Image (spheres, rainbow, N blue to C red):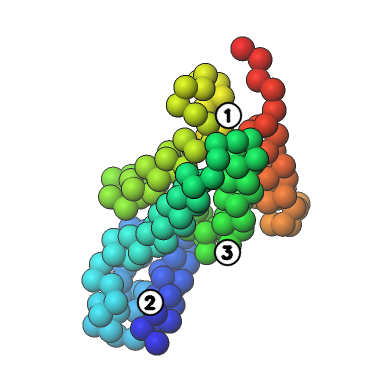
C-alpha cells in the first residue's frame, strides 16, 4: 500500500509540475489533488525536492542497470546496437516520457538539483558505452548523438501529426543510422 501511495503522489506531482511548473506547485496542492492531508503527504515526501529526487532516481537506476549490462557484453557493433534498442525501449515507458517533459519544462528550476546532476552523469557514462575511449572524437560523438536523438524526437516532433509509436520508431531508426552510419573526416 505504501508503494502505491508513493507512486500516486509521484504521478500527481509530475502532472502538476508539468502543467503549472515546479516552482508554482506547492505540496498543499499535491496533497489536495491526492485527497489527503499535507501531513499524510509528508509521511512519504518531506519536500518537492524529495519527489523530484524519487522520480530522477528511477531514471538513474534504469540507466545504471543498462550500463552494467553493456559493460558485461563484448565491445562490438552488435552490443552498441542492442544498447540503443534497449534504451529506446526504456524511453517508451509512459512514466519516462512524463519525466522528460517535466525536466524539459523546468530546466531552470532544476539546473542545480543534485539528483538531476547524477542523472546527467549516468547518461554520459551510458553514452561512453557506445564507443571506445581511443575512438576518434566523431565516433564518440556519434554514440552520444544516437542517444540524444531518442530524447529529442519526443519534443522536436510534438507538433507533427504522428502517433507516439510512429515517433519512437522513427527516432530509433535515426538513432541506429547515426550510430552505424559512415562519418567522413
Disc nearer the start of the sequence (3/2): 2
Residue sitting at x 56%, y 24%: 139
Q: Where is residue 73 in the image (x, y as percent from the top left)?
A: 54, 45
Q: Distance between the residues labelled 1 and 2?
A: 38 Å
Q: Are marks 1 and 3 in contact (CB under 8 Å)?
A: no
Q: Where is residue 100 in the image (x, y as percent from the top left)?
A: 50, 53
Screen quadrant of the N terminus: bottom left
Disc nearer the start of the sequence (1/3): 3
Q: How far apart are marks 3 and 2 (CA)?
A: 17 Å
Q: Which element carries disc 1, helix, strand or loop?
A: helix
Residue sitting at x 69%, y 22%: 182
* Side of 19 where 88 appears, left or right: right
Task: Say the numbered circle drawn on residue 94.
Answer: 3
Disc 1 designates what residue? Answer: 142
* Side of 117 where 150 appears, left or right: right
Crowd class of label 2 (few under 14; some 14 to 19; many from 20; radius 10 Å): some
Screen quadrant of the C terminus: top right
Residue sitting at x 47%, y 22%: 134
Q: Which element carries disc 2, helix, strand or loop?
A: helix
Front: mark 1 or 3: 1
> Does residue 181 lie above or below 83 as drawn?
above
Q: Where is residue 118 in the image (x, y as percent from the top left)?
A: 34, 48
Disc nearer the start of the sequence (1/2): 2
Q: In front: 137, or 44? A: 137
Number of numbered labels in the structure image: 3
Task: Say the numbered circle drawn on residue 58.
Answer: none
Q: Where is residue 183 in the image (x, y as percent from the top left)?
A: 65, 20
Disc 2 designates what residue? Answer: 6
Crowd class of label 1 (few under 14; some 14 to 19; many from 20; radius 10 Å): many
Amino acid at each position: 500500500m505504501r508503494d502505491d501511495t508513493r507512486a500516486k503522489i509521484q504521478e500527481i506531482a509530475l502532472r502538476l509540475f508539468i502543467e503549472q511548473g515546479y516552482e508554482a506547485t506547492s505540496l498543499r496542492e499535491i496533497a489536495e489533488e491526492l485527497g489527503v492531508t499535507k501531513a499524510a503527504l509528508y509521511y512519504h515526501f518531506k519536500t518537492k525536492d524529495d519527489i523530484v529526487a524519487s522520480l530522477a532516481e528511477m531514471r538513474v537506476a534504469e540507466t545504471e542497470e543498462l550500463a552494467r549490462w553493456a559493460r558485461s557484453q563484448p565491445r562490438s557493433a552488435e552490443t552498441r546496437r542492442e544498447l540503443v534498442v534497449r534504451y529506446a525501449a526504456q524511453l517508451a515507458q509512459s512514466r519516462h516520457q512524463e519525466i522528460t517533459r517535466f525536466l524539459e519544462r523546468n530546466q531552470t528550476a532544476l539546473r542545480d538539483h543534485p539528483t538531476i546532476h547524477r542523472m546527467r552523469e549516468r547518461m554520459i557514462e551510458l553514452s561512453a558505452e557506445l564507443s571506445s575511449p581511443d575512438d576518434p572524437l566523431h565516433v564518440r560523438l556519434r554514440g552520444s548523438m544516437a542517444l540524444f536523438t531518442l530524447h529529442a524526437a519526443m519534443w522536436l516532433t510534438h507538433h507533427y501529426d504522428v502517433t507516439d509509436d510512429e515517433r519512437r520508431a522513427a527516432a530509433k531508426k535515426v538513432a541506429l543510422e547515426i550510430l552505424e552510419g559512415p562519418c567522413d573526416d
